[in-house]
Amino acid sequence: MVACLKITDGNAEFHQIVDFLTASSIHYALIVSPTIYASYIKQFWTAAKSKTVNDVKQIHATVDGKTMVISESSVRSDLHFNDEDGITCLSNDEIFENLALMGYERVSTKLTFQKAFFSPQWKYLIHTILHCLTSKTTAWNEFSTNLASAVICLAKGQKFNFSKLIFDGMLRNLDPTYKKFLMYPRFLQLFLNNQIDIAEPFNDVYVTPVHTKKVFTNMKRKGKDFSGRITPLFASMLASPVVEGEGSGQSTEPQPAPFTTQPIIEEQIPVTESSSP
């Protein structure tokens, strides 16, 4: 999906997290939305095969009669990530400790977490990364250690390897024991556009799902068994970008948006053809 990162009067209690995501290193990947041609996405996944060249994992496919190659480094380049030396997964202790700091209320030793047990802004952060960057095909309320690591690193200003997260998801989709999904249509079309010249098929455009302002309403609803307690974002996430005064050379002070208490409930996401139960 394409993220909703617009500041409006109607989502005032989310201005801080929207500002944070807009200024983050993943902003481009959250909003890039090329015109997607469904037949090319299908051709890619039908033909895609995993290969190792000089000890580097790659995905090779033929699309429109032309060969394309995708690797972790090409994902990094095309999605404007600077994460080559980024963290891939935090330790379990670090994950539990930091999720607690984010206000996660469910006490458990399980390594599957529920986004319903966070207050609205944290829930929106998790929801956005989950729906816009991952290859997840199961329950949308749940997330595992790799996504938890991504959220924590992003919130704390630590470099996380989103390129590997995305590329590994594509590799898993090639497992012959599972049915392939036509995943990552936004990213794949971007990769195609950057590598090969393709014709524009007639009447073949896939309309990318987009988060609408309704997502903010859903994030504010109180989920079952959640106390409704608000946990603020980390102080480091609230720093506004420096804006120089015209001709003065002086910068403005950060002004975090006002935050009000609101309850939450889980959003129901429609199941698409490419999603499993």
Image (spheres, rainbow, N blue to C red):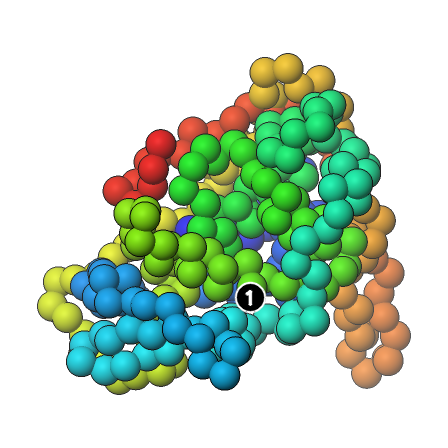
Residue 213: x and y, percent? 48, 41
Q: Nearer the viewer, residue 30 or 249?
A: 30
Q: Which residue corresponds to mark 1? A: 163
Total number of numbered labels?
Answer: 1
Q: Nearer the viewer, residue 229 or 149?
A: 149
Residue 196 visible, this orientation: yes
Q: Nearer the viewer, residue 260 or 187?
A: 187
Residue at screen point 25% across, 57% down:
206
Element carrying mark 1? helix
Residue at screen point 77% across, 70% down:
243
Residue at screen point 32% across, 48% down:
177
Q: Nearer the viewer, residue 270 or 98?
A: 98
Mark 1 crowd level (few <14, some 14–19, many ≥20, 10 Å Cα) = many
**Residue 65 occupies which quadrant of the picture?**
bottom left
Residue 85: x and y, percent? 70, 71
Q: Is residue 274 left or right of residue 3?
A: left
Residue at screen point 76% across, 60% down:
158
- Depicted 143 relative to depicted 163: above or below: above
Residue 184: x and y, percent? 39, 58
Q: Is residue 234 left or right of residue 11?
A: right
- Depicted 203 relative to depicted 274: above or below: below
Q: Amino acid at mark 1?
A: Ser
